[in-house]
Amino acid sequence: MAFSREHKEVIVQQYRDWIDNSKAVYYLTYKNMTMPAINTARAKLRESESEMHVVKNRLFTRVLEEKGYKFDPQTWEGNNVVVFAFEDAPAAAKALTEITKGNETFVVAGGYLDSALLNAGQVKALADLPTLPVMRSMLLGTILAPASQLVRTLAEPARGLAAVIKANSEKQTSAA
């Protein structure tokens, strides 16, 4: 189906907006795609606040060129879908790994983290990272560890003194 120039501009603007609002962009090749497969994939990606869209390759590569993203033109010759991770890049990569595991419909071809080009292996490595909330809790635990250790160290003499007083009290109670 041929699109008018105005409609193509609307599509290109939508691609620009999606890229601008994304923390990461992943692209997948597909074959024998069915609506149940894409609906399942989209539902899984929605959980990580990501979206999957079938794109017009020429229009999407035009936006990539405008934004200064590097890409291999051969990558964009077949059938492609693009996943836009709006919140958590590792969570979206993790969802993609789950979608493609045991599924021959979709194959992760690569992606972009900010504007850095990622190959399929790097997307897999990103999927192995903990999610953002887990990373935050790990960082918070690391920051708080010295403070909590200091509190325990300062409280230990008082705890020892309390134990001695309690033992002495019990000894006197049992003697009486």
Image: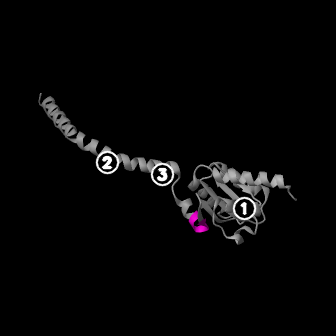
Q: Residues within 10 Å of mark 3 (few under 14, many from 20)?
A: few
**Residue pointed to by mark 3:** 135
Q: What amino acid is labelled 2 in the image?
A: Pro
Residues at marks 2 and 1, CA–CA distance in whole angstroms: 51 Å
Residue 52 occupies which quadrant of the picture?
bottom right
Contact flag, marks 2 and 1 (Cβ < 8 Å): no
Q: Quadrant of the C terminus?
A: top left
As for residue 142 lying within the magenta part, the answer is no
Q: Which one is in front, 164 or 150? A: 150
Label 2 vs label 1, nearer the camera: 1
Q: How is the image coloured?
A: one colour
Q: Which mark is residue 146?
A: 2
Q: Position of residue 20 (x, y in %)?
A: 64, 52
**Residue pointed to by mark 1:** 62
Label 1 vs label 3, nearer the camera: 1
Q: What amino acid is labelled 3 in the image?
A: Met
Q: Position of residue 65 (x, y in %)?
A: 68, 63
Dominant secondary structure, magenta: helix
What SS does tag 1 mark?
A: helix
Q: Which mark is residue 125?
A: none
Q: Position of residue 5 (x, y in %)?
A: 83, 55
Residue that sits furthest to the top in the current view: 176
Q: Residues within 10 Å of mark 2 (few under 14, many from 20)?
A: few
Residues at marks 2 and 3, CA–CA distance in whole angstroms: 18 Å
Q: What amino acid is labelled 1 in the image?
A: Arg
Q: Which residues are magenta?
A: 118-123
Contact flag, marks 2 and 3 (Cβ < 8 Å): no
Q: Position of residue 137 (x, y in %)?
A: 45, 47
Q: Which one is in front, 114 or 147? A: 114
What SS does tag 2 mark?
A: helix
